[in-house]
Amino acid sequence: MLLDDEMKTKLSPYLEYIEQPVVLNICVKNDELSQQVRAFAQEIAALSPKISLNEVTLERTGSFTIDTQTAKSGITFAGLPLGHEFTSFIMALLQVSGRKPKIDDKLIEQIKTINQKLDFISYVSLSCHNCPDVVQALNIMAVLNPNISHTMVEGSSFQSEVEAKNIMAVPTVYLNGSEFFGGRMSLEQIVAKLGITSTAADLNNKEPYDMLIVGGGPAGAAAAIYAARKGIRTGLLSETLGGQVLETLAIENIIGQKYTEGPKFMAEVFEHLKEYPIDIIPAIAATKLSKGKLIELTLTNGAILKAKSLVLATGARWRNINVKGEFDFKNKGIVHCPHCAGPLFTGKEIAVIGGGNSGVEAAIDLAGIVKQVTLIEFAPELKADKILQERLKTLANVTVVTNAQTTEIGGKDTVASLSYSDRASGKQTTINVQGVFILVGLMPNTEWLADSVKRNKFGEIEVDKHGATNIPGVFAAGDCTDSAYKQIVISLGSGATAALGAFDYLIRQG
Ligand SMILES: Cc1cc2nc3c(=O)[nH]c(=O)nc-3n(C[C@H](O)[C@H](O)[C@H](O)COP(=O)(O)OP(=O)(O)OC[C@H]3O[C@@H](n4cnc5c(N)ncnc54)[C@H](O)[C@@H]3O)c2cc1C
């Protein structure tokens, strides 16, 4: 039995929403994966009279398509869509049957206008919590447009294909045979990357906003809701919708919610946001801020948005260590998300850089999968909580190196070695590793502000108790500011503060 009772319970209410009958076209032989795929499809088909089964020949043995009885959908799952991908499977089932995807009508129209042939393949792992967003986005594109197809390949079931392509991070997406992108991307970002998005002219024509918010994490979302509730013209511009919370699997400190998961929480935040007339401009970043009579924000495509007040909520991102090789091997053995990419390093030797909580947690998790972990910490001792350090010490395949400075990450096509120097003796050591997990904290997304807004030595925007910056009319909130602590509830609160501060400013301007 591949579907346990919990999964069947999760699935059964959704099966009621199947509109027209769907067919699972399976490609199977006698190997173990084929047997599992056949069993999975049979168990699913047994749950609804609207789902039938058929055997076909596909490119990958151990795969299946979801189609209607009359048309191909373009969606293929190679390997089992279990773990985090089970939801992707359920959504694909419903959407192929005719249920409209829950996305913006404008976006639906943009996708439908694509008239070139786009064949996507996404390589995923079932433990990757960033992968379902990408899989679901590409499936939606396939369902909406017959020119588009998408195959999800579960990496561990197609190990030789993954190795042949040197895939060392998930999700990795190929388009028409070439690598297209790696890492999380929203549907809006994928559409934008294809060059099908609001043009600079569309954006330049927008009326000035009363309040424009930059950033779509908790701080930006809270600011936008507070602004819109005042009945003023509100815009929200963000490179990605969701922010860092999407990187977080288990959240237990949002007061009033005993437990939630990052993607679920941010989906609820955006459902809330959509209740208000907020002009959301996704998948474009701001690159310059200037102030004349109005505040002007230049975007990556050259467009300029104007606003009477602005809330900066651009958050933070993983810090780099700036050593030779770090950028050459991005997605080729250098990783920031242990949950996502861990399974790709099964049986291999890896290094974790960073002895804080996230580094030590990663080393503990990875020790269960990989052959050997070397944990490298710059300081003379680890900074992680004692309880984590104690747990680390019990693991036979973990070596801890403290007081060490990483000097180079080496390799040919993918990571093969890591060099570090002992900070006391200067002695250089090179170890063989196939993966380097860099977990050395975060840095604020504020470089683009250049010298326009005052920041402290860490690059954090300095704000007062109203969220105001040194520029009249420009406010800031969340992890991009000098707030003492960086947490979701703190970002939500500071987003509200900045929006209320900006609203007071607007009132005083008359
Ligand atoms: C792995 C991990 C686990 C965590 N776990 C927890 C937890 O359990 N509990 C908790 O309370 N906190 C947790 N945090 C911290 C929490 O996620 C952050 O404090 C919070 O997300 C900050 O929200 P924010 O809105 O300020 O910024 P972010 O969430 O970083 O969002 C910033 C947004 O701005 C956008 N942006 C950036 N630059 C630009 C630009 N130039 N133009 C346009 N848009 C831009 C980004 O795309 C993003 O959407 C965790 C963080 C991480 C990384």
Image: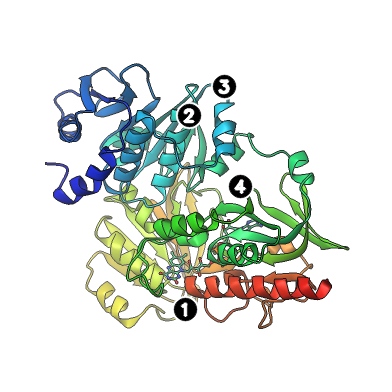
Q: Quadrant of residue 204?
A: top right
How crowded pointer 2 is (Cα within 10 Å; few <14, some 14-19, many 20+) is rated as many
- Tell me what residue is drawn at x 39 percent, y 38 percent: 123
Do the CB atoms of the residues marked 3 and 2 lie less than 8 Å apart?
no
For the residues labelled 3 and 2, the Cα–Cα distance comes to 14 Å
Q: Which residue is mark 3?
A: 116
Question: Between disc 3 and disc 2, whose residue precedes?
Answer: 3
- Screen quadrant of the C terminus: bottom right
Count neighbours of disc 4 (C-alpha within 10 A) and say few if under 14, some if 14 to 19, many if 20 or more.
Answer: many
Mark 3 lies on a secondary structure that is loop
The residue under label 1 is: 379
Q: Tag 4: residue type?
A: Ala
Marks 4 and 2, Cα distance to the nearest angstrom?
20 Å
Q: Position of residue 357 (x, y in %)?
A: 39, 73
**Residue reaching furthest front?**
231
For badge 2, the amino acid type reads Leu
Depth check: 76 or 172 in front? 76
